[in-house]
Amino acid sequence: MVLTDIMKVLYTPFIALLPFRWKKHFMVVYGLSSYSNKMQCRYFASVKSQKKRTELLKREMSLEAISFLWAQSEHDVREEIILADVVLNDKQFKMLVDKEETLLIRRYLSKRTPSEAMLQMLLSARMAEPFLFCVEQYGLSARLIGEVFALEKLSGSDMESERSKMFRQQIVGLTQQALNRYAQRQMVRQAHSQEEWQLFLQQQDSLCLAAQKMMNVWQYNVYHAAGFHLSAEAIVWFLSKGDASMWRCILKYEPQSAFNGEAQALINANPQLMSLALSNS
């Protein structure tokens, strides 16, 4: 280790004089993080393999170099950084919001839980779709719930855009719906007794698709007993999985009209499912 450090000190001035294609060899030997942010980014740009670029972002480049790359790059490179599962700070996320890069925002939020500052940015920018996605997936703090309700009470100026006005008028109702779906998913995950689950279902008009797909067999039995049915999408999802106990319940409880073409195709393609379906006919 000491000898390596000495060699680096001795050869650094010499390496600096080499053409970049030769410098790349020493960057690999000594590690990219030993070089400047600019040099690391230049090395990254010289790599053509998508797999190798992802490895560089995940394991070899320093966080400072990735931040430098993020600030200097265009859409495609920022997408690579997000797909490499790099955690963004609030400043980096703000760039996406300012540029209205909705697709990249959604991709990041599907992989990482946003900070409260990020949610505030989405709310302030009137970006309803990604904001509501976060509310449904991650919930919302009491402070931001207050911010949402405060928006509805604001009186818009003459210069306010139609989009902003519509956002203010609809955001409270949409947020409440998203929070209800969040609560349903949390309840499916946390329900510990049939009595608790039954009481919760008595207070619901329906269960969202995401919550339906999370149910286990005993929860589905109580769900059916409470008078609810699975959506066609949930039936397809369960039939595509390998849970024979759930298959038996679905084929017993759900009306034939609830099985769409995809569900029927799944039954026809699976001998075990077909046998269960015939025994319930």
Image (cartoon, rainbow, N blue to C red):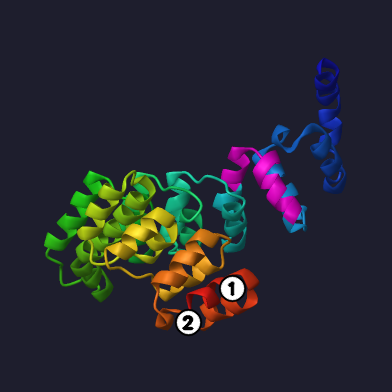
Relative to 157, 209 lies left or right = right
Task: Give the image quarter of residue 26.
Answer: top right
User: Of callouts 1 and 2, which one flags the residue occurring earlier in the amino acid sequence?
Assistant: 2
Magenta range is 51-68
Considering only vertical position in the picture, is 142 above or below 217?
A: above
Relative to 51, 76 lies left or right = left
Report x, y in % for residue 134: 37, 55
Is residue 250 part of the magenta span, yes or no?
no
Relative to 84, 238 lies left or right = left
Tag 1 and tag 2, C-beta contact below 8 Å: no
Q: Quadrant of the N terminus?
A: top right
**Which residue is painted at 43% across and 56% down in the image?**
217
Q: Farthest residue in the front direction?
A: 279
**Which residue is painted at 82% across and 46% down in the image?**
20
Report x, y in % for residue 180: 27, 58
Q: Which residue is mark 1?
A: 275
**Comparing marks 1 and 2, which lies closer to the viewer?**
1
Q: Which residue is mark 2?
A: 260
- Number of labelled discs? 2
Q: Nearer the viewer, residue 233 or 142?
A: 233
Give the crowd class for mark 2: few <14, some 14-19, many >=20 residues within 10 Å.
few
Report x, y in % for residue 221: 37, 59
Q: Amino acid at mark 2?
A: Asn
Q: Nearer the viewer, residue 175 or 79?
A: 175
Q: Nearer the viewer, residue 90 or 83?
A: 83
Q: Amino acid at mark 1?
A: Ser
Q: Secondary structure under badge 2?
A: loop
**Which residue is painted at 82% across and 43% down in the image?**
24
Q: Secondary structure under badge 1?
A: helix
Report x, y in % for residue 207: 31, 64
Q: Is residue 125 visible?
A: no
